[in-house]
Each structure stands twice: as structure tokens, then as C-alpha cells.
Amino acid sequence: MAMVLTLLLAEIQGRAGLMLTVLGFSASYIVFTLTVYLVHRYYLDPANEVLAAIERKVDAALAELSAERTGWMVDNARLESIELDNSVEEVWIVSKDIAGDVNGGYFIEAVKKNLRRGVSYVYFLPDDSRSRGQVMALRSLHNEDAKIVVKYLREDFFFLVKDFDFVIYNPRKDSVEGHRSGYMGLPVEARYGRWQVQVTDSLIETLVGHLNDYVSDR
């Protein structure tokens, strides 16, 4: 009998240990599940909602930048339509890189069409080997058209930013009757696209004043 009781007690103790182990694992799982729920409920879900709200605002902001709804900020397509307007008689381009006008650039056809209808172009470029190579390509592309004039500027003219560039339409006319306007390229990464902002007439006046000395001997 004593032996039987001893065996029964051992069995009970063994089962109790197993039950305690199972209960421990179960409690740990419950705590883990509850923790995950709470993190999602009070931290991740609100964070995801905030991120989603930010994404919606960014999409809305990008929509606002469309050419139909924003007059002061334009993409290449809108700028091309401005350049091809019949009111444009002369174009001044100030840039460190005129890749958009050569070697498959976006504005090649616009320049060709304008040259055919008598629009003149003046390019203000840094005096370096890349610019001279691009000028050779530009002149070859347009059959040495005399309406294309190139003026080389000192490097310090382009001190502001690496991608400093301006385009001015009808620079020697006024901004009302003469339809003068100017746009400055934004130095943003290529993945955002190419954007230009319209500049004030006072800035155009300042630029034209500085550049007139270079074109006076044309």
C-alpha cells in the first residue's frame, strides 16, 4: 500500500509539473498576443493612419502642381507651350547645361519650329569644354542658323547653384504689352521631374540689365 501511495504521489507531482509548464507557455502566449494587439492598436495603427494622411496630402500637393491649376510653377510640357506661343519673338537661355536643346533633348522641336518662324535665340553659357561641345551639337542640329547666338559668361555668374538656369521670353520688351516672362529651373532631383517657377519682372529686369552688355556686340 505504501508503495502504491508513493507511486500515486509521484504521478500527481509529474502531472502537476506538466500542467504548470503548459500553463506557463499559455500565459506567455496570451501576454505576447495581448502585447502585439496593444502595439498595433495604440502605436502602429495610428502611425499608419498618419503616414496615410501624409501620403494623401503629398498626392494632393502634386495635383496642385499640374499646369491647369498652377500658373507660377510649370513642367517641361507647359514651358514648351509657352515657348511656342506666337507672341514669343526672342528667347534668352542662361544655363550651365543645355542638354534639353541637343542630343534628343525635350526642347529640340520647339526650337526648330521657332527658328522657322523667325524667333531668335541667345544662349548664355559658361566658358568650358562641355558648353562648347554642346554648342557645336546645337549649331549642327539647326544647320548653323544665324538666329542662334551664343555668349560665354564667366564661371562666377553661375555661383548660385550647380543647375542654375533661366529662360526669358521677349527679354527686351515689357511684361505687359510685350509679353515678357521668365522662368527659373528648380534644382531638384531628376526623380521629381523637371520644374520651373515663374520669376518676377524685377528679377528679369536685373538679369537683362546684366546680360545686355554681352549681346550689345552681336
Image (cartoon, rainbow, N blue to C red):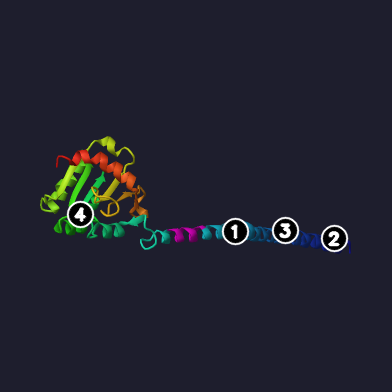
Residue type at mark 2 is Thr
- The residue singled out by tag 2 in the image is 6
Residue name at image x 78 percent, y 61 percent? 16
Label 3 vs label 4: CA separation?
85 Å
Which numbered mark, 1 or 4, is in the foreground of this view? 4
Label number found at residue 24? 3
Query: Around disc 4, counting alpha carbons within 10 Å, would you say few (fewer than 14), some (14 to 19), or many (20 or more)?
Result: many
CA gap between label 2 and label 1 equals 59 Å
Secondary structure at numbered mark 3: helix
Which residues are drawn in magenta? 54-61
Which residue is label 4 attached to?
A: 89
Check if mark 2's residue and mark 1's residue have beta carbons within 8 Å: no
Q: Earlier in the sequence, mark 2 or mark 3?
A: 2
Q: Nearer the viewer, mark 2 or mark 1?
A: 1
- Looking at the image, is mark 3 or mark 4 nearer the viewer? 4
Alpha-carbon span between mark 2 and mark 3? 27 Å
- In this rendering, the answer to whether 26 lies above or below 195 is below
Instruction: Please name the amino acid that badge 4 sits on.
Output: Glu
Pointer 2 with pointer 4, Cβ within 8 A? no
Which label sits on residue 46?
Answer: 1
- Label 4, secondary structure: give it: loop
Q: Mark 1 or mark 4, which has the lower sequence index? A: 1
